[in-house]
Image (cartoon, grey):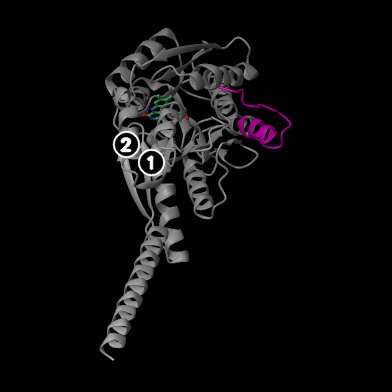
Amino acid sequence: MKYTNRIKSIIGIICITVIAVVLLIWTFGKDREENKWFAVFIPGVMDNSPVYSMLEKGITQAVLDYNENNNTNYKLEVVEAGTNQAEWGAKLMGLAAMKKFDVIFSSNPSIPDLALPITQMYPEQKFIILDAFYQGNPNIATVRFNQREQAYLAGYAAGLATTSKDSQMKYSNPQKKIALIAAQEYPVMNKIILPGFIEGAKAVDNDIEVIFKIVGNWYDANKGAELSRALYNEGVDVILPICGGASQGVISTAKELGFYISWFDDNGFSKAPGYVISSSAMEQEKLAYEVATKYFEGKIEFGSATTVDIEDGYITLVTDDKNFENNFSEDYKEKLLNEYSKIKEKILILDSPES
Ligand code: RBF
């Protein structure tokens, strides 16, 4: 009798242990499933870099909406890596080494090269990188914008303004000179954005001269102002700034001296009404939202590189802004919108080259 009781209690203990272990595994599994962590790695700072603030906004909203609709508890950590580019690789590696993040989201064409060695060391770590183009690594998915189209429109607007009579556009001078001020040189800048800008300007008038200047970083507004003042003195009347915080210096100088700005990445009309002649924007927030949601739904194809463009609606020429509608001549707006339509309808084909 005693013996049977003992066996019974042993069986009881075994049963309870098994149930506890099963419960533990189930809870742990459920926790992993519902409490996934994601990271947004900002290679720079978000302030004055719309491409980064749009990335952060889009992913944040995607996480919020997915949680609400699916009863999940996904969490997001946003890491600003700062302006010292030499530190980015180590900071990205540090994030992967935590083995905490299901996916690291980021944006800019230099990130795939930093992510590649990390995927060797941490083969579980996945990356989704926007504004970048890299295919063939099973841990990396990229989506870039057709920036030839985007830059072409910025150049076309600049071309129209610099060749305009000053009775039509008051800051336009008789010289046909425009400029692009870039923060730094990089392959997409040298092979796609600058050539696209030149191509757009020359489509207006082949005699337009395009000057290219470099700030040397993405934050120095004084240097941006100094470069644009010198360009103005050389006869430049339209500038495209692609230089993050340094663009602030270009804007303030435009208002002080009187020249035009062709704006890139988001809607910049309100930054200097009457001076900003165009905004060729990338729909980075929408793209970030969609890509993150697709990942949550298990629909991202890793190893792939996609390009989105004007026809798809991921690059837009901003036209529904009163500072565009009210400050410029019908002739100027009509010519610009006409060129935009030609690209949208693929009458004018501007495929993006490999970078
Ligand atoms: N764009 C920004 O707006 N802010 C930045 O801080 C910034 N840093 C960049 C750093 C590197 C190494 C590279 C290659 C690009 C960077 N960009 C930055 C440019 C961005 O990818 C894009 O080309 C421009 O925003 C024009 O669309």
Location of residue 176 (image quadrant):
top right
Q: Which residues are magenta?
A: 336-355
How much space separates mark 2 and mark 1, taking CA atoms?
A: 7 Å
User: Is 175 placed above or below 262 here?
Assistant: above
Q: Horizontally, is 157 left or right of 74 in the view? A: right
Location of residue 146 (image quadrant):
top right
Of the 4 image quadrants, the one containing the C terminus is top right
Q: What label does residue 47 carry, if any?
A: 2
Callout 2 secondary element: loop
Q: Are marks 2 and 1 in contact (CB under 8 Å)?
A: yes
Residue in the image at 51% along x and 24% along y: 169
- Front residue of 279 and 349: 349
Amino acid type, callout 2: Asp
Residue 166 visible, this orientation:
no
Whole-percent x, y for residue 227 in the image: 35, 14
- Residue 257 falls within the magenta-colored stretch: no
Residue picked out by circle 1: 53
- Front residue of 347 and 120: 120
- Front residue of 354 and 218: 354
User: Quarter containing ligand 1?
Assistant: top left
